[in-house]
Image (cartoon, helix red, strand yellow):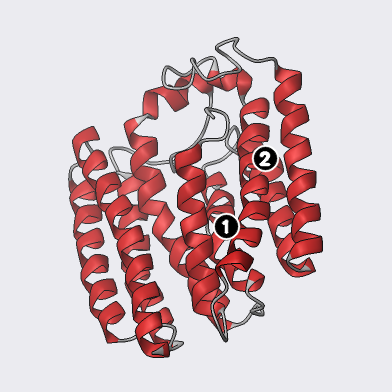
Amino acid sequence: MQLAKPRIAAMGMVAVAVGYFVSFRGTFAVAELGIACFGIACVAVACSFLNQWYEQDTDCRMARTTDRPVPGGRIRSGEVLSVGLLLMVVGFVWLLVSVNALTALLSLVTLVLYVAVYTPLKRVSSLCTVVGAVSGAMPPVLGWTAAGGRLDSGAAALFLLLFTWQFPHFLAIATIYRKDYEAAGLRMLPLVRGDANGAGFVSVAYACVLIPVSLMVWQQELAGNLYLVVALTGGVVYLVSSVRFLLEPSAERAKQLVLCSIVYLPTVLLTMTWDHYRLLS
């Protein structure tokens, strides 16, 4: 269970369900959503297993990860790799047979980007957060395609919403654990000159972009005016929190920004779902 990171996987499945619901045409089928979620969850958990297998050496050097199952010595490295690869194959084949080829392919691409590109890039450049954000923005798109949707402007709106949201969230977390990342040799924060708060500048920039990006969902008529109000309000609050983090780059401000981010996303996604249901009704 620790290797699977169930809370993160559960949040991903919520995003998958939202993408599935706003894409679905006709009578909503809970069983079909469950079938899709099972395959996508297998791939998501495989990402977690393979990531922890790859990062076992850096996990040993960080206080917050030193007690994970592999560096903590509670499970062997080879077992983690074997189960991770097995889950990857099971998830891909399940999606290919039970859902559709596009969803299976996108799930595999997401895993490869996360494990084979994002994870090793963390040791080289802070640009790793861009690759990580691509993987993190895929769950609603996988739900969209699992319901039969094409890679069109609707899928792009969902992708960009989650992609843009992640940057203030990730950079605030990286600021909180800066010393841990430095000890492990991971370059999670943007390079800065002098006393400039690079993480704060980037966070504010993406929080600004998030407001018009979030309105793409409304423009695509995937949700109505209730979503519009909630997205605008939430976006402004997120931006204010990011500006406060820029002006005072302390761990306390970073924690406040993280809290704001984890309230914003489910609020916006659930409002989108409810408002889409109202439009259909």
Establish if 137 lies above or below 228: above
Residue displayed at 59% across by 72% down? 144
Kindly indicate the quadrant of the structure image that contains residue 279: bottom left
Question: Label 2: which residue?
Answer: 46
Residue located beneath label 1 in the image: 134
The mark nearer the N terminus, 1 or 2, is: 2
The amino acid type found where label 1 is placed reads Val
Residue in the picture at 18% in, 50% down: 244
Element on which disc 2 rests? helix
Residue 105 visible at all: no
Q: Residue at 64%, 79% (x, y): give it.
A: 149
The x, y position of residue 108, in whole percent, is 74, 53
Looking at the image, residue 103 sits to the left or right of residue 263; the answer is right
In depth, the one of 167 and 20 nearer the eye is 20
Which quadrant is home to the N terminus?
A: top right
Q: Residue furthest top?
A: 73
Nearest the eye: 116 or 32: 32
Task: Name the spot of residue 194 as percent of width and height, x first.
Answer: 32, 38
Residue 112 percent location from the top left of the image:
72, 48
* The one of 219 and 79 positioned closer to us in this rendering: 79
Identify which residue is drawn at 65% across, 77% down: 151
Q: Are marks 1 and 2 in contact (CB under 8 Å)?
A: no
* Picture quarter with the C terminus: bottom left
The type of residue carrying mark 2 is Ala
Please tell me whether residue 112 is drawn above or below residue 268 in the rendered image. above
Q: In the rendered view, does 239 fall on the left or right side of 218? A: left
